[in-house]
Amino acid sequence: MLTAAFLLGLLVLTAVFGGSGVGGGPGGSGSLGKSEDPENEEKDFPVLWAAPGTIARTLPWELDPDRRPDTDVTHLVLTDHRLLVLGGLRDPRDPREEVLWETDLSTVAAVEPRPFSAGKRDFRITFTDGSWCRLTSVEGQPLVSRLTAA
């Protein structure tokens, strides 16, 4: 469990998968931009592309909106040295969260906004081993801008 003092030192970026947050499809409202990868954006919409043993393959199952209970929430946290996924309950009376996944920032090759995205909420994180995940943020463009600037 993270302490309040520790959390004050972090730049917490709210990101929840699926229709309610960071996720597996073009989220939010607004028109979709131009598809750059029809095979992976129109015909199929994978959340990640990762061979066994790659970094993206280790991402937590809680990021999958079809597997995660509606009562749960995930947050993406960016520090000076790490990228983390925290998980907790969508209950303000129980704000506890736990680290579900983490990686050194040195394993992140790129963070790119995806134009085929309603409300400019989608972004892709590509890792140094070539694996990647595509996420949708509740915050939309402001979050994507902060991530791509990191």
Image (spheres, helix red, strand yellow):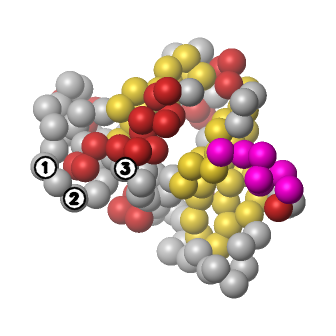
Circle nearer the viewer, 3 or 1: 3
**Residue 135 in view (yes/no):** no
What crowding class fits label 3: few (fewer than 14 Cα within 10 Å), some (14-19), or many (20 or more)? many
Q: Is residue 17 left or right of residue 53?
A: left
Q: Is residue 136 left or right of residue 29?
A: right
**Position of residue 47 measured from the top left corner of the image (x, y, whole percent):** 43, 42
Contact? badges 3 and 1 (CB < 8 Å): no
Disc 1 is placed on an element classified as loop
Instruction: Name the image quarter holding the C terminus.
Output: top right
In depth, the one of 25 and 11 nearer the eye is 11
Residue tagged by mark 3? 140
**Position of residue 68 measured from the top left corner of the image (x, y, whole percent):** 54, 65
In depth, the one of 70 and 31 nearer the eye is 31
**Position of residue 142 measured from the top left corner of the image (x, y, whole percent):** 40, 45
User: Where, by quadrant of the figure, is residue 113 drawn?
Assistant: top left
Three-letter code, disc 1: Ser
Compared to residue 121, the image places residue 5 above or below, namely below
User: Where, by quadrant of the figure, is residue 143 drawn?
Assistant: top left
Residue at image position (30%, 54%) is 27
Residue tagged by mark 2? 29
Residue tagged by mark 1? 31
Q: Is residue 18 left or right of residue 127?
A: left
Instruction: Name the image quarter holding the N terminus.
Output: bottom right
Indicate yes or no whether the magenta region holds residue 8.
Answer: yes
Three-letter code, disc 2: Ser
Three-letter code, disc 3: Gly
**Position of residue 54 measured from the top left corner of the image (x, y, whole percent):** 62, 24
Residue at image position (63%, 50%) is 12
- Distance in Å between CA atoms under marks 1 and 2: 7 Å
Of the residues under marks 3 and 2, which one precedes in the sequence? 2
Disc 2 is placed on an element classified as loop
